[in-house]
Image (cartoon, helix red, strand yellow):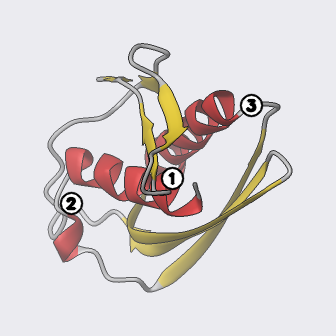
Amino acid sequence: MDEAFAEAGKALMAVIGSPDKVRPTTQTVITCQANDPEQLFVDWINALIFEVAANHQFFLRFSVTIRNGVLTATGFGERIDPERHETAVEPKAATYLMLEVRQQPDKSWIAQCVVDV
């Protein structure tokens, strides 16, 4: 599940702009806690949206660990630089529409939801 959440974070960054122009010069620790994986996923995506909007952070990649309903992640990125980072959209929030966190038969995980922009 950890990797699915990390990949979802990268996908969110790709929707926001061009992560290939982001340099991993800073590390930001993000924590979330929830009783079920679906709520934890929504909280995770909303925490990332907050970091982008409030702290002007843009991330290249994430290291995510989930244990006993607690997500601890490190985002590797930098402060948004309008001259280098082309931003396309500003997401507002993760929604519960199409929310799904499940393990597939091959033991990999899927984590998804619709994000309101």
Give the left or right position of residue 39, taking residue 3 as reference. right
- Between residues 90 and 74, which one lies in front from this camera angle? 74
Label at residue 5 = 1
Q: Outermost residue, front direction?
A: 105
Give the left or right position of residue 68, taking residue 81 as reference. right
Q: Which sits earlier in the primary sequence, circle 1 or circle 2?
A: 1
> Residue at 15% across / 67% down in the picture?
83
Comparing labels 1 and 2, the label whose residue is closer to the camera: 1
> Residue at 57% across / 77% down in the picture?
27
Callout 3 secondary element: loop
Q: Residues within 10 Å of mark 1 (few under 14, many from 20)?
A: many
Give the left or right position of residue 15, taking residue 57 as reference. left
Q: Which sits earlier in the primary sequence, circle 3 or circle 2?
A: 3
Q: Residues within 10 Å of mark 2 (few under 14, many from 20)?
A: few
Amino acid tagged 2:
Pro
Callout 2 secondary element: loop
What residue sits right under mark 2 in the picture? Answer: 82
Q: Outermost residue, right direction?
A: 68
Do the residues under discs 3 and 2 have CB atoms within 8 angstroms?
no
The percent coordinates of residue 53 (x first, y second) are 45, 42
Question: What distance separates the C-alpha of mark 3 from that of mark 2?
Answer: 37 Å
Q: Residues within 10 Å of mark 3 (few under 14, many from 20)?
A: few
Height in image: 96 above or below 6? above
> Residue at 52% across / 80% down in the picture?
26
Amino acid tagged 3:
Asp
The percent coordinates of residue 62 (x first, y second) are 49, 69
Amino acid tagged 1:
Phe
What residue sits right under mark 3 in the picture? Answer: 36
Comparing labels 3 and 2, the label whose residue is closer to the camera: 3
Callout 1 secondary element: helix
- Between residues 82 and 42, which one lies in front from this camera angle? 42
